[in-house]
Image (tube, rainbow, N blue to C red):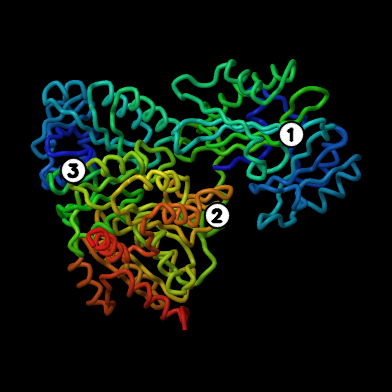
Amino acid sequence: MKQYEYLAKAVLRDHGIPTPPGQLVRSPDEAAQAVQAIGPAALKAQVLVGGRGKAGGIRFAETPDEARAVAQAMLGMNLKGYTVETLYAEAKLQIEREFYISVTTDRNRKTPLVMASLKGGMEIEEVADEDIVRQWVDPRIGVMPYFGRELAARLGLHGGIAREFADLVVKLYQIYRERDAELVEINPLAVVDGHLVAADARLNLDDSALFRHPEVERIDEGSALEQKVHQIGLAYVELDGDIAIMANGAGMAMATVDAIQYFGGKPANFLDAGGGASVEPTAQALDVLVSMNPKVIFINIFGGITRCDDVAKAILQVKASRGIPVPLVVRLVGTNEKEGVRLLEEAGISAYSDMAPAAERAVMLAGEGRP
Amino acid sequence: MAIILTRDAKIVVQGITGNQGRFHTRQMLAYGAQVVGGVSPGKAGEQVEGVPVFDTVAEAVQATGADASIVFVPAPFAKDAAFEAMENGIRLLVMIPEHIPVQDSMDIVARAEDRGVTVIGPNTFGIISPGERTKMGIMPNHIYQPGPIGVVARSGTLSYEIAFSLTNGGFGQTTVVGMGGDPVVGQTFISVLHHFKQDPETKAVVMVGEIGGSAEEEAAEYLKSFGKPVVAYLAGRAAPPGKRMGHAGAIIERGRGTLESKEKALSAAGASVVTMPWQVVDALREALGSQNA
C-alpha cells in the first residue's frame, strides 16, 4: 500500500530523519496560511504517482497571495488520472546537491537491498548502473552503523556529510523493518547548508503486514469498482475492454485475460474468484461482472479445490436473482464437473471443457477478434 | 524417482484441526502420503482422520519421527509455526498460507538456509510426486500421473490446468513444485531446476511463470547449461504496469518484471516459449522429439 508523501515524511520525522517544515492543505486559504507560517514554499500535489514535478504537480509560491492562487489552480486538477484533493506545502529549499537512497526487498536474493547514488533527483531507473551503489542486508543482522559508513565510503562521501549519511541509512532500515515497508525511498536526498534533508519520500507498505499496524490508515488507490470488489475480498483489476472475465486463481485469471487478448478480444477486467471459492463469493463476483454491463461474460474455471457444482450454483443464483442480460460463456472442468455441467444444461447454459475454444467463442460473441 | 519429496517423507500437518488442515489431511492420506501426525496447540490427544494430534512440533517429531511439515495456520502465525518446525528437526517445510508478511518470509528463508531446511512457498499449492504416491499440498489428486516431466510453477490453478493437459497428452510427471506467488519464497526456478537436472527420471521440464520480479530472467542464465528440454509458459501478457494481478509478486514495477523481458531471456537460453497454456503439450512433444532425432 503506497503512502502519500506527507505520511511518508511524518514517518521519516518519527525516526529522526530531517525533513523540511511542511503542512497539509486542503483549500487555497489553508495554502496561504501555510506560506504565512513557513515562508516561500513548494506546493506538492498528494497523489500516488511518480513524476509529479514534470506533470505540473509541484509548484512554488513566495507569498501567501501567490500560494492562494497556485492552490486554487492545483486543487481539483487531474494529474495522470488522479484528482488532486490535497497539497503538501513545504518550505522551499536551497538545494546544493541531490542524492538518492532507498531500502527495498531483493526478491531473488530474498534479502533487503540498500541502493544509493550521488545522482539523485531523477527516477532511479534513469540513473546509469555504474552510478548506483548496492549493498545487501543480512536480515539476521540488520543495518548497523558500520554498514552505513561503508556505503558512504563507497559513494565517496567524507566528513560530516558521511556521518550524517551513515546515520540516515540505519534509520531508513529501521523504518523498512519496523513499518513492514516494501520500499522506503528518499529522492532527492538533498544537501542544504551542508546537511542532509529528505526533500521527497516514498513509502510503500506490505499489504500482508497491515494487521501489525492498526494505526495506519487504509488507502485503496483503485477505481470505485476496484474498491467495491476488493471489499468482497477478491483480487480485481479494471482493464479497458468489454469482455468481462472471471477465473479461479491468480495465474488462471491472468492466463484467461491473456487468452481473450490472444484471440483479438478486449478484456474488461482481471478477477480472481479464489482458488477454492464457494457459492457465495463466486456469486458476488459474478454480480459485479453483470453490473459492469459488458458485451460478454467469460467464466473460466479449472475446478481443483473449487467445485464445479458450486460455480454452477453461483451462476444460476445470479441468473435467478438479477438476471444475466449479456451472452455468457462458461468453461468448466475438474472436481464435480458432471454435476456442474448438468446444472447449467438444465438452465439452458452449455459449458466448454477446453479453454481455447471457449475463449475464442467469447471473443466472437463480442463481435471482436481477427477477421 | 522424484525431487525434494519422496515416498519416505513422514509428514506432520501444522494447523490440522482447522477446516483446511482437516480437508487436506484427508486428501493427502487418500493420495498415499505418509501423514504421521498433526499439531494444534491445546488439541493434544485428538485424532484427525486417524492421525494423532500433538500440542507441539517437538512432541509430534518425538512420537512419530516426522521430518516434513505442511503449514496451514493463519498468516499472522505462520512465522512462529515455521520456526517451530525448523528448530525441531523438520527438513522439508511447505508453507501454504497467503498474505504472510514479506519480512516474516525473509526471516524464515534465512533461518532455513542456516538449518539446511527446504522451504516450499509461502503462498503455494505445495509439491506432489505422482510416481511416489505422495504429496504435500492442496492440489487436486486426480489430475496427475507418474511420468518423465518435471513441472515448476509459480501459480496453483494455472499449474493444474497445465499438469492436467500433460496427463491427458500422455506426459506424466516426476514432481510438480509450486514455488508460490509471493515476492519472497523459499525456492527459485534455478534451485528447482537444479534438482530436476540431477534426477535421471526427469526427461524434460515445464516452467510456468508470470509477470513480476526477475526469477525467469535469472533462470534463463542457468538454462544454458541445463541439458534437458524446457518448455516455458508465462502468464500476464495483458497485465497493465503497476497493478498487482492477484499474487503479491505478480506486478510490473517501475519497468521491471515484464513478460517480454522474461520470454526474451528464456528463448535466448534455448527454452521453447509458448504463448498460451494449451500449447504446452505440443511444444513438449516437439522438444522431446527433436532431442531423440
Give the image location of residue B289, x and y in percent.
24, 63
Residue type, label 1: Ala
Residue found at the very far front of the displayed protein: B293
Label 1: few (<14), some or many (≥20) within 10 Å? many
Query: Is the C-beta separation of discs 2 and 1 under 8 Å?
Result: no
Residue A270, picture quadrant: bottom left
Name the residue beneath numbered marker 1.
A199
Could you give the CA–CA distance between mark 3 and mark 2, rounded to whole angstroms?
38 Å
Judged from the image, the secondary structure of the residue bearing numbered disc 3 is loop
Name the residue beneath numbered marker 3.
B2
Residue B241: mark in rendering: 2
Left or right of residue B172, residue A39 in this image: right
Q: Is residue B1 above or below residue A156?
A: below
Give the image location of residue B28, x and y in percent.
16, 44
Give the image location of residue A116, x and y in percent.
64, 31
Left or right of residue A77, residue B42 in this image: left
Residue nearest the observer in this picture, B3 or B47: B3
Please report the residue visible at 41 percent of the width from the left and 71 percent of the height from the top. A297
Query: Is the C-beta separation of discs 1 and 3 under 8 Å?
Result: no
Marks 3 and 2, the one that precedes in the sequence:
3
Say whether mark 3 and mark 1 are on the same chain: no
Q: Is residue B215 among what the camera can see?
A: yes
Judged from the image, the secondary structure of the residue bearing numbered disc 1 is loop
Judged from the image, the secondary structure of the residue bearing numbered disc 2 is loop
